[in-house]
Amino acid sequence: MRNDIVHIGADELTYEIRGIMNVARDLEKMGVPMVWENIGDPVAKGASMPAWIRDIVVRAVRENDECFGYCPTQGLFETRAFLAERAKTNAPRGLSPDDILFFNGLGDAIANIYTYLNARARVIGPSPAYPAHSSAEGAHAGERHITYNLNPERNWLPDLHELRNKVTYNPAISGILVVNPGNPTGQTVPKEVLEEIVGIADEFDLFLISDEIYGGVVHNPEEMVSVAEIVGEVPALVMKGLSKEVPWPGARCGWIEVYNRARDGMFDRYIRTLVDAKALEVCATTLPQAIIPEVFSDPRYEATLKERSAAYARRARIACDIFRSVPGIIAPLPNAAFYLSVVFEDGALTDSQTLPVEDSGVREYIARAARGVCADKRFAYYLMAHAGVCVVPLSGLNSRLSGFRMTLLEPDEAVFANTVENIARAITAYVRG
């Protein structure tokens, strides 16, 4: 090309959750049946939107012409007013409808949040990381995403000492990201830890981003504390959506709630930039916004969430009971979302371990694919070739830890237990060499 047209952060745009599917699809074509444990899509795993919610959607399509048109840039006013009123229950600071901005899913929100942030302003986030955040933040700055570690030996608690040190000695850090409940960890952040993070943000004049897309999928609801409940005077963005709760990931409907916008003129200008950017796109999708008040107000909604969360909790216990007897790994019990992350102990993995693969063509293919990759990705490749299970290596989630993430979405608990047992046997054989 006449000029360099490649974005400065192009190399930071990685999404291992889908990236590993390239190898998995090749193996499928070679005759290896695959169990998909890589993507958190409840629908793909057999979850069905409840009939009563379907009825609300159908009625909206039949009776509400507004669903087929553009909505205001920030989203349907009636829905924003409903969400603002609903937020008063848990958010002492309160919200107005103008403090809410809809996006086409949180992927769209994440892209905009980092794209329109000053390139010299950095946001520090947890590791292991959800790659949409870590990739978008790294790409906007043209450098690797800055992280604070989550400790698997302490139920994935954030390392607050590390967080404070990095904020203290890196003046470019302007915001702190919290993913609560965690992805890929499946843990909620305790209130006292959140309060310390809010305190660090307040002390250093930072803003907060709290991704709470799994906030309604908590095994024990009392364990979930939103940043909005304790934010005080700190400017903050709280991210929510429909994809994991309803579940309706294909709706691409997410929103941010903005707290303490008026406290800081620069933060207010940044939020206006996000609104202006959404205006250039016109608006977010109208139909899913239109059903939110009726769905969230229905008493069956909370009952549905409790039922699904209880099922995830059962599967988490099944998996952890099986993994408990496997040498060389740490598998903290999740208490939210629908993920389980397993970490290999130091020294458990090498760059020469393999698993038996019967088909010679598959064996040769996976040996080539696994050459030179990270140790946990090598395990994930051999797990696919040997046992036909696709998981996400933690090294692909901006983590210094070797391990993998799997889902708790398989509705047939006998099938789920069998999948976990296959993984456990593979780990044991792989680690023993």
Image (cartoon, rainbow, N blue to C red):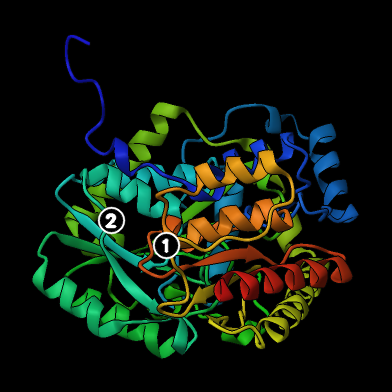
Q: Quadrant of residue 57?
A: top right
| Residue found at x 25% / y 52% | 144
Mark 1: secondary structure: loop
Quadrant of the image for the C terminus?
bottom right
Q: Which amino acid does label 2 sit on?
A: His
Q: Position of residue 212 (x, y in %)?
A: 51, 65
Q: Residues within 10 Å of mark 2 (few under 14, many from 20)?
A: many
The residue lying toward the viewer, choosing from 230 and 162, is: 162
- The residue furthest front is 360
> Does any portion of residue 174 appear in the rendered image?
yes
- Asked whether, in this view, residue 51 is left or right of residue 370, the answer is right
Residue 145 is labelled as: 2
| Residue found at x 28% / y 41% | 116
> Does any portion of residue 40 appear in the rendered image?
no
Q: Quadrant of residue 252?
A: top right
Tell me: residue 248, above or below residue 400: above
Tell me: residue 20, above or below residue 296: above
| Residue found at x 31% / y 50% | 137
Q: Mark 1 points at which residue?
A: 129
